[in-house]
């Protein structure tokens, strides 16, 4: 019977849980990140979602340091295992070649692991989260840097908050660029403006990455933007969860060690 592994991607807006049965992602769930929640509250939610499934191990990527101890306590209490966090000392298979490797978010490294394993390299990963990140992994598994831009949702929220007479609108592609009412005007500016940001950055990255093989999008709004993008070739909604499972396997089989 395949072993069950829980992977946790803790971001600023959402915490995503994934249950792997062997090498297959059986289920995944998205929870709101709430820093005031206790380990018991997170544990009750997780157990309601997973039921009485026995968990062999847990791998966590977190970009929210204040909740790391809460997640660790929750895993220990409700799943009776010691969680592994993606942090220095954990073998990822990716060499981080930037000015300060400790500055790189764990989720960005996890995405590079999964992208390199699945698509090869050189590759660019665009992750549409609270911030939108663009990351580069080379053919020989080196992380060489990237870009951080304000996320689409927080960009739109800034517009709603600062322009008193503008209504809050759904973020979606309007039927035309030129709108004939305020709502469509705003949707066009938000959607096509952000698409221009994404394609503008990717176009410039193409000019700097020799032999770029592929560009992958992941995250909540990846499908919407990728459908209109001139550069994005793949949408991979489970990229981060898969990367966590790959890292878990590398550490379980080979033991921890610094890359």
Image: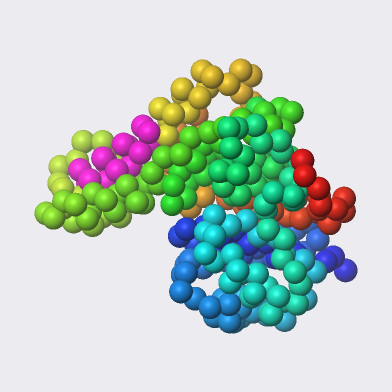
Location of residue 25 with respect to 147 vertically, above or below? below
Write the start and end of the magenta stretch as one range.
184-197
- Which image quarter holds the C terminus? top right
Residue 39 picture location, percent across and down: 58, 77
Identify the residue at image location x=81%, y=48%. Answer: 257
Residue 248 picture location, percent across and down: 76, 55
- Which image quarter holds the N terminus? bottom right
Can residue 14 be seen here? The reply is yes
Location of residue 111 with respect to 166 vertically, above or below? above
User: What coloring was used for the rendering?
Assistant: rainbow
Q: Quadrant of residue 185?
A: top left
Residue 8 shown left or right of residue 221 in the figure: right
Identify the residue at image location x=75%, y=69%. Answer: 82
Location of residue 115 with respect to 29 vertically, above or below? above
Please name whichever residue, 97 or 196, is drawn nearer the observer in this view of the structure.
97
Can residue 235 be seen here? The reply is no
Please name whichever residue, 105 or 168, is drawn nearer the observer in this view of the structure.
105
Identify the residue at image location x=73%, y=55%. Answer: 245
Q: Is residue 245 magenta?
A: no
Residue 229 picture location, percent across and down: 45, 33
Residue furthest out toward the left: 165
Please name whichever residue, 175 or 234, is drawn nearer the observer in this view of the structure.
234
Secondary structure mostly seen in the magenta stretch: helix
């Amino acid at each position: 019977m395949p072993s069950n592994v829980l992977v946790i991607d803790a971001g600023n807006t959402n915490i995503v849980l994934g249950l792997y049965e062997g090498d297959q992602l059986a289920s995944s769930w998205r929870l709101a990140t709430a820093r005031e929640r206790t380990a018991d509250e997170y544990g009750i939610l997780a157990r309601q979602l997973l039921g009485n499934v026995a968990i062999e191990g847990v791998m966590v990527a977190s970009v929210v340091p204040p909740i790391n101890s809460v997640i660790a306590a929750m895993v220990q209490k409700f799943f009776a295992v010691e969680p592994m966090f993606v942090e220095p000392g954990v073998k990822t298979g990716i060499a981080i070649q930037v000015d300060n490797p400790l500055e790189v978010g764990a989720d960005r490294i996890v995405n590079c692991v999964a992208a390199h394993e699945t698509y090869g390299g050189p590759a660019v990963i665009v992750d549409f989260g609270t911030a939108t990140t663009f990351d580069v992994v080379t053919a020989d598994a080196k992380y060489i840097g990237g870009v951080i831009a304000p996320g689409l949702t927080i960009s739109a929220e800034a517009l709603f908050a600062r322009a008193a007479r503008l209504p809050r609108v759904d973020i979606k592609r309007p039927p035309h660029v030129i709108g004939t009412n305020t709502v469509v005007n705003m949707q066009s500016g938000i959607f096509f403006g952000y698409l221009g940001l994404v394609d503008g950055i990717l176009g410039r990255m193409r000019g700097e990455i020799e032999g770029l093989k592929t560009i992958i999008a992941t995250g909540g709004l990846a499908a919407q933007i990728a459908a209109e993008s001139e550069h994005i070739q793949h949408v991979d909604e489970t990229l981060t969860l898969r990367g966590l499972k790959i890292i878990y396997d590398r550490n379980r089989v080979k033991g921890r060690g610094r890359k």
